Image (cartoon, rainbow, N blue to C red):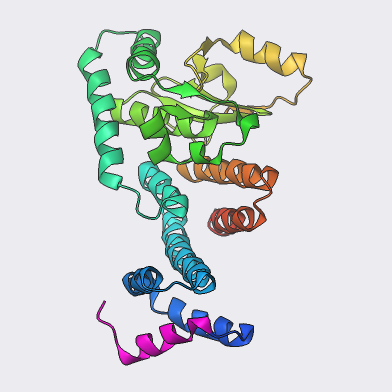
Amino acid sequence: MHTTREIDALLKLLDDPDQEVYTAISAKILDFGKDIIPNLETLWENTADSKVQERIESIIHKVNYNDIYKGFQKWFKQDRPDLMEGAILLARYRYPDVDETEIRRTFKNIYQSCWLEMTPYLTPLEQVNILNSIFYNMYKFKGVDLDENKTNLFFINEVMQSKSGNIYSLSLIYQLLCEKLDLSVITIQLPRQYLLAYYGHHTDFFDKLPRTVIQFYIDPNNGTIYSQNDVEAYLKKYQLESNDDHFKPLSHQQIMLSHMEALATAYEQNNEEEKMNEIMDLYELGHLNP
């Protein structure tokens, strides 16, 4: 963006000690959107005033957040939004300059490794075992307990790079691979448990699928296969409610909502209240567009 007199004048006022003046100035700067970020970055590099630098950082964050908010407004309104796009959009919350090309390149490499091993004559269990071998053994993806509250492991770029994730980020990537490979594996959310389920080829995925249609379950943390009896025993052991709604596939919107809710909880447990509130504001968008 070319510097204009108006922008130049606004930026010069960022050191005003009056909080009301700063609030008014920052609101006007936000109106310019992402185009003003280069100006803000240049100013940050050329000022020695730490308070001004903090204000600039805050404004840049708000500019990026507003852009993400608008992105999710559009994303949630789609009938079946692209799950990869949603994951990348969320990653931009913490990593504004996230390399989307690198994420897609890494994903493509994993997919191609799986695709080369698939044949039309494999059983569903054999197909999933191949995917598991490549995803968890060849590429070394592994799950990290949610109790560790590592918020970076909710973001797809970080997971692709570190090969470590949690049940939400790993299940998202796993489902994306299955969609690309045409495997009928979709995420479900049981009480206190997040799993992937192999349904086979059926229609009416999101309307009438009871638990009897599921062939087996997959733990996104490590690829462990569970039977229906295993899941029923788990629910019974912990005296958890069990009904057919828990066994219905989550839509892409519902997957992202679960992702956001868990991320907000992690921020809350880390005493990062502002970040928790921002993620919950994104979460609320999904409920405005069911």
In the image: residue 143, left or right of residue 116: right
For residue 1, above or below residue 161: below
The residue located at (57%, 81%) in the rendering is 23
Is residue 4 covered in magenta? yes
Is residue 245 covered in magenta? no
Choose between 246 and 21: the one closer to the eye.
21
Most prominent secondary structure in the magenta stretch? helix
Q: Position of residue 273 (x, y in %)?
A: 67, 55
Q: Is residue 27 visible?
A: no
Quadrant holding the N terminus: bottom left
Q: Position of residue 212 (x, y in %)?
A: 56, 17
Instruction: Residue at the far right: name it.
Output: 239
The residue located at (57%, 87%) in the rendering is 21
In the image: residue 229, left or right of residue 25: right
How many callouts does the rendering have?
Answer: 0
Choose between 65 and 23: the one closer to the eye.
23
Q: Position of residue 145 (x, y in %)?
A: 59, 26
Q: Determine which quarter of the picture holds residue 136.
A: top left
For residue 44, above or below residue 227: below
The residue located at (25%, 32%) in the rendering is 108
Q: Determine which quarter of the picture holds residue 29.
A: bottom left
Choose between 223 and 198: the one closer to the eye.
223
Per the rendered image, the range of residues in magenta is 1-15
